[in-house]
Image: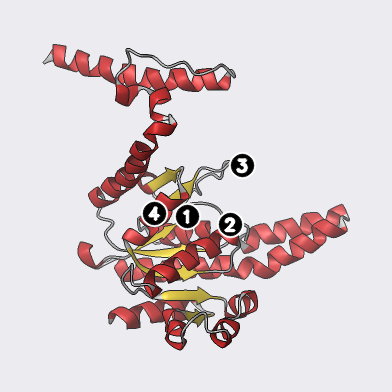
């Protein structure tokens, strides 16, 4: 028994050392040199080759799936939205600093942040509604908040679930400017992806609804991916809720698409506009008869 434990310990250290060695080389700007004798699955240089991309796809598919299954995350409500919206408290602090600085451009930005901060609170309140519903349900009936794991609207939704003592998921993405996970995600459900495609696939695997708050290119990418999958019946119908009627109707005109015949009238039924957290939750409850 002692011998087996020693062997296991040595094996674990060798695996850890392999990755530590790679990180050390990278930090020092040294070229990465393959180690022919290293076990293939413990060889970072080998796993990062172009030819092993398919293996990396599979790993990014498998790891979050297994971890969520083991923790009872079967059904999620996915919340998208801008990473740039601040909480009301942070927005007010930013405004006060801008006023003191006398910087006109900074003041314009800070005023906009204050104007948009209500979306942070609304995402937080919506998540609390979902978590409150699930608190006393059987495991198979529970709904969990899932976000992109970053700041802004994502943080707000994870925060609302956290305040209710509920588990919540964060599916973060590795970016050049290193977006870090927000502190309200359940640590064992905080995942990091390299590939956008695999990340978006994980959003859809367990999603029972999508709530999209105002956001930029990333939010639009995720939103239209879901709409397209549902429209083409590549994914089962789910409630798609656009939170912030004025924002979404100013951003893109479905009337133009209808007039030009690029969408059908029935496609307008794929999503619903709302402006209050309870209204968003009501749409989901009505869809599933909760």
* Residue 42 in the image: above or below residue 179: above
Task: Identify the mark nearer the N-term, 3 or 1.
Answer: 1
Viewer-nearest residue: 207 or 157: 207
Figure disc tally: 4
Residue 194 visible in the current orientation = yes
Contact check, label 3 and label 2, Cβ < 8 Å: no
Contact check, label 3 and label 4, Cβ < 8 Å: no
Residue under the point 57% across and 87% down: 259
Instruction: Find residue 112 and report its horizontal and vertical position in percent.
Output: 73, 66
Instruction: Find residue 48 and report its horizontal and vertical position in percent.
Output: 43, 30
Task: Identify the mark nearer the N-term, 2 or 1.
Answer: 2
Disc number for residue 169: 4
Instruction: Find residue 125 and report its horizontal and vertical position in percent.
Output: 48, 69
Secondary structure of residue under mark 4: strand
Task: Identify the mark nearer the N-term, 1 or 4.
Answer: 1
Task: Identify the mark nearer the N-term, 3 or 4.
Answer: 4
Task: Identify the mark nearer the N-term, 2 or 4.
Answer: 2
- What residue is pinned by disc 3? 177
Residue under the point 61% across and 62% down: 216
Estimate the spatial distance between the alpha carbons at disc 3 and disc 2, rounded to whole Å.
13 Å
Residue 185 visible in the current orientation = no
Q: Nearer the viewer, mark 3 or mark 2?
A: 3
For the N terminus, the quadrant is top left
| 272 to the left or right of 95 | left
Q: Nearer the viewer, mark 1 or mark 4?
A: 1
Disc number for residue 123: none
The quarter of the displayed image where residue 136 is located: bottom left
- What residue is pinned by disc 2? 83
């Amino acid at each position: 028994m002692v011998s087996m434990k020693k062997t296991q310990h040595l094996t674990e250290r060798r695996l850890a050392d392999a990755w530590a060695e790679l990180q050390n080389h990278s930090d020092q700007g040294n070229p990465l040199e393959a180690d022919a004798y290293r076990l293939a699955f413990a060889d970072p240089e080998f796993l990062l080759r172009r030819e092993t991309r398919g293996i990396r796809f599979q790993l990014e598919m498998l790891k979050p799936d297994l971890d969520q299954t083991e923790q009872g995350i079967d059904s999620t409500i996915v919340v998208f939205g801008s990473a740039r919206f601040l909480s009301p408290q942070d927005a007010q602090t930013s405004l006060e600093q801008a006023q003191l600085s006398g910087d006109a451009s900074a003041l314009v930005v800070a005023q906009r942040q204050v104007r948009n901060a209500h979306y942070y609170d609304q995402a937080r309140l919506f998540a609390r509604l979902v978590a409150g519903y699930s608190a006393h349900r059987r495991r198979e009936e529970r709904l969990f908040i899932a976000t992109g794991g970053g700041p802004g609207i994502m943080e707000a939704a994870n925060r609302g679930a956290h305040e209710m003592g509920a588990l919540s998921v964060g599916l973060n993405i590795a970016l050049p400017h290193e977006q870090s996970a927000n502190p309200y995600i359940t640590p064992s459900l905080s995942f990091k992806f390299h590939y956008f495609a695999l990340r978006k696939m994980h959003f859809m695997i367990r999603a029972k609804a999508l709530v999209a708050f105002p956001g930029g290119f990333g939010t639009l990418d995720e939103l239209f991916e879901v709409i397209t999958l549902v429209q083409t019946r590549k994914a089962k119908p789910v409630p798609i809720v656009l939170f912030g009627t004025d924002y979404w109707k100013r951003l893109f005109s479905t009337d133009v698409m209808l007039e030009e015949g690029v969408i059908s009238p029935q496609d307008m039924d794929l999503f619903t506009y709302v402006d209050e957290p309870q209204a968003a939750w009501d749409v989901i409850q009505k869809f599933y008869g909760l």
